Amino acid sequence: MPLKNSTQMNVSIKIIVPGSFVTGRISPTKGEGLTKVKKRIPEIILQNGKRQEMAFTEALDAASDFDIVFKGANIINYSRNKATVFTGSPTGGTLGHILRRMKSDKFRLIVPVGLEKNSSTDLLQLVNKPQRKFRTIGKKIPKLRLVPGELFTEIEAIRQFADVEVTQIGSGGIAGAEGAVVLAIRGEEDEVHKALKIIKKVQGEPAFK
């Protein structure tokens, strides 16, 4: 989706099979999860709207202030525009590669993330707590690191297409809607209808398998 105040492009890329592009995840403790997807795909690199077959680190090295890097998160504090991610690799994983290059490069880092991960926790305080003694069931917890990017949630996505005010007014659900969020959209009638039209187009996306 084109971002406001950024270069617009026509992206010609095949639809990603849900579950095929997952470089890290939290899944049920019993079973592996996402077992029906046979082919996994690595990081996706786009240049002028076309996918490029190149390593992620190579793309970062070639990035400039006209480029955008997307990196997800495990938890966010929306009101403070903060996000953190788990890193199990001693070198920092994907985020480690990004942070090392951000010191010298000017590319824009955006954090696409769902509001189901929103929390009131002070994330800066959280990442500064000693983590060596934290444990999950049977193993140590991955290291928590701040992602110094711009949050891009359902709120920002809707506001790309309509001049409306969007507020999260509910979270959670049952029968498959456990990760749902409820949003209130306010604005001029035609702008609200514009937003609802876009939402209806993307509703019903297939679940991960």
Image (cartoon, grey):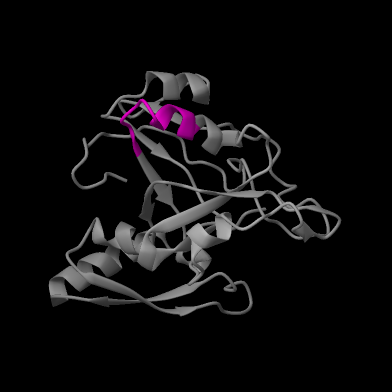
Rendered view: 26 above or below 176: above
Instruction: Residue 151 in the image: state x and y as whole percent.
Output: 38, 54
Name the residue located 83 percent from the left edge and 60 percent from the top edge. 137
Name the residue located 49 percent from the left edge and 58 percent from the top edge. 124
Q: Nearer the viewer, residue 5 or 186?
A: 5
Rendered view: 168 above or below 4: below
- Residue 41 figure quarter: top right
Q: Is residue 44 visible?
A: no
Q: Nearer the viewer, residue 180 or 35?
A: 180
Q: Is residue 97 visible?
A: yes
Which range is magenta? Answer: 98-108
Q: Nearer the viewer, residue 149 or 66?
A: 149
- Residue 160 figure quarter: bottom left
102 inside magenta stretch: yes
From the viewer's perspective, is 52 left or right of 86? left
88 inside magenta stretch: no
Rendered view: 89 above or below 168: above
Q: How many marks?
A: 0
From the viewer's perspective, is 30 left or right of 90? right
From the viewer's perspective, is 112 left or right of 42? left
Name the residue located 52 percent from the left edge and 41 percent from the top edge. 16
- Residue 157 figure quarter: bottom left
Instruction: Residue 37 in the image: state x and y as whole percent.
Output: 68, 43
Instruction: Residue 165 in the image: state x and y as whole percent.
Output: 23, 72
Name the residue located 25 percent from the left edge and 61 percent from the top edge. 159
Instruction: Residue 42 in the image: state x and y as whole percent.
Output: 58, 31
